[in-house]
Image (cartoon, helix red, strand yellow):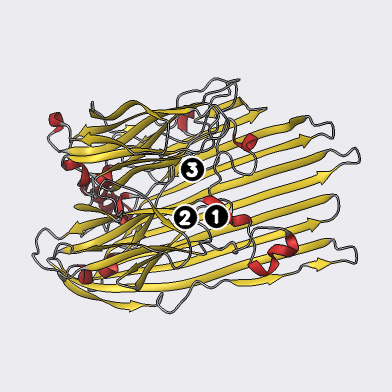
């Protein structure tokens, strides 16, 4: 190994240790499920843990959710761990019985969302149970004081047997040196002091909160959730209003994007994940494996650090979140993560460049639709947009004058292809949303932090409704969902740490509504492939297949060294936000 390579490796190891990255190696994985079982099963990884026995705080136990009311609880930090936590993990276990549709689940403390997800759909013969986890280490500052909390299952009932959701949730606090990347403060954008989502009915609606922040903010981020509700639930299958009647599809268009502003000035964007809930399109598609992130939504983290100098001026500032294209309802929540300059009483500065301002999110729409003499429709509708922008700010800190720059390329492409005639209604949705982002900080000519992230959300949905010569109605549906993420922490042009996450679910089923009134399902099958790799030789791989509503196969660790999943305890193999995107040297 050359002297230069050795020097870079030494810098690499020293930087990881400084950040608390040299953590315990964790043999990740999920417990081996039972082949043949119809219970809910996913290939998602558990949250990696450091060594040691955690202190446990129970939030609620065997709570019965029979309506849409809030279930309050009191939170207090664990007395035995003295507030020095190397990692904080939420664990929750749920089960659902009865004739209930897919429900939204929330857990809140002090107005901040600790968990946001949905439920599988039960059947007459199955009451599914499932387990979820979330890494809350970045929310440590919130959890240091006693506060009120509440849980909510926003239930939608049908039929006479209204059913029940049972839930238990706990926080695990692992003793040790506090994570160096954890923010110093966490603020909620919720209007409810204990916690609630905000409904955004259209593009003009906004979730807003006004803060007077500390005078020494040096970095800031916003964790954003935006989940489609009501008629927006399958927003990605909709078409612009001018085509809705012609192709018998929902109107309102299919472009959705979350936008963040500070005092009315555009501050960042977040793509909207095309979630499909467990009753979406065809509930048989999701038994026993739900769609990507259906049980456990992942927030998107927006870097607001170029605004640090502005946020530190002692004046009130309003942070707002809206969803461009919202047509009938999105449920939104967000948490503001703030890092303070411990060696400075006052940080000053300004936003020096913002090319996102003046770039409205207006997609380009084109079509190739044709109608023949019989009124049959064929062709496609395309909606696309691509924007590049730079937001730059300076902050005078105890370490010097820091220039922070966020550069992003944001893309969206949706193509709806139709074949419509007297015996067939066939719609194919092909969509990808993507963000290519670089957050960089400099003191003079010295680059002190460089974080790069690429995410993409591919979706393909094939919906084919046909009438046979016998008068049977066949509805064949198939969906391919994906979540892909690449990240890299760089310093002085060197990748200190990089990782790749990929989660793909493929599902298919045909519903048969026979002319004699009978119904059946044909060819129900699904698969999930989840993979994570990183530059420390971390590896997680799990795959499953299902058939006729039951687990057919499950593999764990294939392709990893020794056939074993193994990742470091500081990593985020589920694709959740990575350590505040924190700069490495300030």
Residue 489, by quadrant, is bottom left
- Of tags 3 and 2, the one toward the viewer is 2
Asked whether the viewer can see residue 27, the reply is no
Q: Do the residues labelled 1 and 2 touch (CB within 8 Å)?
A: yes
The label on residue 137 is none
The answer for how far apart the CA atoms under marks 1 and 2 are is 7 Å
Where residue 393 appears, x then y in whole percent?
Answer: 27, 73
Please give the residue where the numbered disc 3 appears in the rendered image. Answer: 293
Query: Callout 2 environment at 10 Å: few (<14), some (14 to 19), or many (20+)?
Result: many
Where is residue 167 shown, x and y percent of the image?
38, 29
The earlier-in-sequence mark between 3 and 2 is 3
Q: Could you tell whether 385 is left or right of 223 in the image?
A: right
What SS does tag 2 mark? strand
Q: Which of marks 3 and 1 is in front?
A: 1
**Local secondary structure at mark 3:** loop
Q: Name the residue under label 1.
A: 232
Please tell me whether residue 524 is drawn above or below residue 127 in the rendered image.
Answer: below
Q: How far apart are marks 3 and 2 (CA)?
A: 17 Å
Q: Residue at (30%, 56%) from the top-left corner? A: 189
Residues marked 3 and 1 touching at CB (< 8 Å): no
Count residues near mark 3 (Cα–Cα under 10 Å), then give few for <14, some for 14-19, many for 20+: many
Q: Name the residue under label 2.
A: 330
């Amino acid at each position: 190994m050359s002297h230069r390579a050795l020097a870079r490796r030494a810098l690499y190891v020293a930087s990881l240790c400084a950040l608390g990255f040299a953590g315990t190696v964790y043999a990740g994985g999920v417990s081996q499920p039972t082949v043949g079982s119809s219970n809910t099963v996913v290939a998602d990884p558990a949250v990696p843990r450091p060594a040691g026995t955690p202190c446990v705080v129970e939030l609620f136990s065997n709570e019965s959710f029979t309506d849409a009311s809030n279930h309050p609880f009191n939170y207090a930090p664990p007395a035995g761990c003295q507030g020095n936590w190397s990692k904080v993990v939420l664990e929750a276990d749920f089960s659902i019985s009865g004739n209930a549709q897919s429900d939204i689940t929330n857990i809140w403390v002090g107005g901040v969302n600790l968990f946001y997800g949905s439920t599988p759909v039960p059947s007459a013969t199955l009451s599914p149970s499932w387990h979820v986890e979330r890494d809350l280490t970045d929310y440590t500052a919130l959890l240091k004081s006693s506060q009120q909390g509440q849980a909510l299952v926003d239930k939608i009932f049908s039929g006479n047997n209204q059913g029940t959701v049972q839930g238990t949730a706990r926080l695990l606090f692992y003793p040790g040196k506090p994570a160096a990347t954890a923010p110093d403060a966490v603020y909620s954008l919720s209007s409810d002091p204990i916690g609630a989502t905000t409904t955004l009915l259209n593009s003009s609606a906004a979730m807003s909160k006004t803060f007077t922040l500390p005078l020494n903010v040096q970095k800031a981020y916003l964790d954003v959730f935006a989940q489609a509700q009501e008629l927006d639930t399958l927003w990605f299958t909709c078409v612009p209003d001018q085509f809705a009647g012609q192709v018998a599809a929902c109107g309102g268009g299919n472009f959705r994007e979350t936008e963040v502003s500070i005092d009315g000035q555009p501050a960042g964007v977040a793509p909207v994940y095309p979630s499909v809930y467990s009753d979406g399109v065809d509930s048989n598609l999701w038994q026993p494996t739900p769609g990507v992130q259906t049980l456990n939504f992942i927030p998107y983290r927006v870097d607001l650090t170029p605004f640090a100098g502005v946020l530190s001026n002692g004046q009130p500032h309003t942070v707002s979140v809206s969803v461009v294209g919202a047509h009938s309802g999105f449920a939104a929540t967000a948490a503001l993560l703030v890092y303070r300059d411990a060696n400075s009483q006052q940080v000053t500065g300004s936003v020096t460049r913002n090319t996102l301002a003046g770039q409205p999110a207006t997609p380009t729409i084109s079509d190739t639709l044709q109608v023949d003499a019989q009124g049959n429709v064929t062709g496609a509708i395309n909606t696309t947009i691509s924007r590049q922008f730079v937001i730059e700010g300076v902050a005078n800190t105890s370490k010097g004058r820091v220039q922070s720059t966020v550069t992003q390329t944001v893309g969206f492409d949706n193509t709806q292809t139709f074949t419509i005639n007297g015996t067939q209604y066939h719609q194919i949705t092909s969509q990808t949303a993507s963000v290519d982002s670089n957050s960089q900080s400099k003191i003079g000519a010295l680059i002190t932090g460089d974080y790069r992230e690429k995410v993409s959300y591919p979706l393909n949905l094939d919906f084919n409704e046909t009438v046979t010569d016998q008068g049977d109605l066949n509805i064949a549906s198939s969906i391919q969902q994906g979540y892909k993420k690449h990240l890299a922490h760089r310093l002085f042009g060197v990748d200190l740490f990089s990782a790749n996450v990929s989660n793909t679910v493929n599902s298919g089923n045909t519903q048969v509504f026979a002319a004699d009134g009978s119904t059946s399902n044909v060819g129900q099958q699904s698969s999930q492939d989840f993979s994570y790799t990183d530059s420390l030789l971390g590896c997680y791989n799990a795959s499953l297949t299902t058939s006729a509503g039951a687990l057919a196969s499950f593999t764990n660790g294939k392709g990893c060294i020794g056939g074993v999943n193994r990742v470091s305890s500081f990593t985020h193999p589920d694709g959740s936000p990575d350590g505040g995107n924190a700069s490495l040297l300030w």
